[in-house]
Amino acid sequence: MKTILLVLIAYFLGSIPTGLWIGKYFYQINLRDFGSGNMGTTNTFRILGIKAGIVTLAVDLLKGTLAVLLAIWFSSSISPLLVGFFAIIGHTYPIFAQFKGGKAVATSAGVLLGFAPIFLFYLLIVFIVTLLLSSMISFTSITVALIAAASALLFPIFDFILKDYDPLFTLVVLAMAGVIVYRHQDNIKRIKAKKENLVPFGLNITKQQPK
């Protein structure tokens, strides 16, 4: 019963549509009607500005971290990582937003922050470098997701960051990567068409030309 309760709490935490609620109650703006139509961090920054974007990023990150920590604090009978994954499912398919959620990047990072912070720090470095090269949040998110999956498979071989194989950790990281890539299908199409949105810095090495 305790584990079921923790899983439900994780899902409901993940289901909090941070950007959507901030836009609706503080700016009288429905994020789904502007920009990419997504309620995640990137569109919040783009439409509502830096303050709203930072709050959205922090809360979406915290949703994943808190789900993991609750499982640790209350001694869940299943891995805290698995409990945290339900927060990712909640973020992606939120009950509080008609099951139309975000792209799972920030909440996935939050889960890793709670369970494997050193691995997350490594991915953060990859994120920054890739963003500076590409000037695209979407491309960077997809790239980091794929690198995270490859790293979870390969690092234990070289005893680097991940010392031993943890089958569950590997499977969850692969699942995270799969969700992130799947949720970025529209972005992938725009990247291929050279029409993806850019951040106002970086090298734009793929030569995107958004409208």
Image (tube, grey):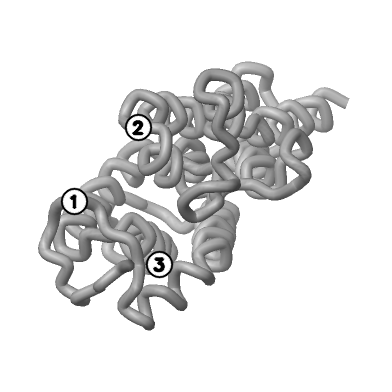
Amino acid carrying mark 2 in the image? Gly
Amino acid carrying mark 1 in the image? Pro
Q: Is mark 2 on a helix, strand or loop?
A: loop
The answer to the question of whether label 1 and label 3 lie on touching residues, with beta carbons closer than 8 A, is no
Q: Distance between the residues labelled 3 and 2?
A: 29 Å
Check disc 2 and report the residue beneath it: 49
On-image quarter of the C terminus: bottom left
Q: Which residue is drawn at 49% across and 55% down?
A: 36
Of callouts 1 and 2, the N-terminal one: 2
Seen from the viewer's position, the closer of residues 176 and 80 is: 176
Of callouts 1 and 3, the N-terminal one: 3
Q: Can residue 77 be seen in this view?
A: no
Q: Is mark 1 on a helix, strand or loop?
A: loop
Near mark 3 (Cα within 10 A), the count class, few <14, some 14-19 or many ≥20, is: some
Near mark 2 (Cα within 10 A), the count class, few <14, some 14-19 or many ≥20, is: few
Q: Which of marks 3 and 2 is in front?
A: 2
Mark carried by residue 200: 1
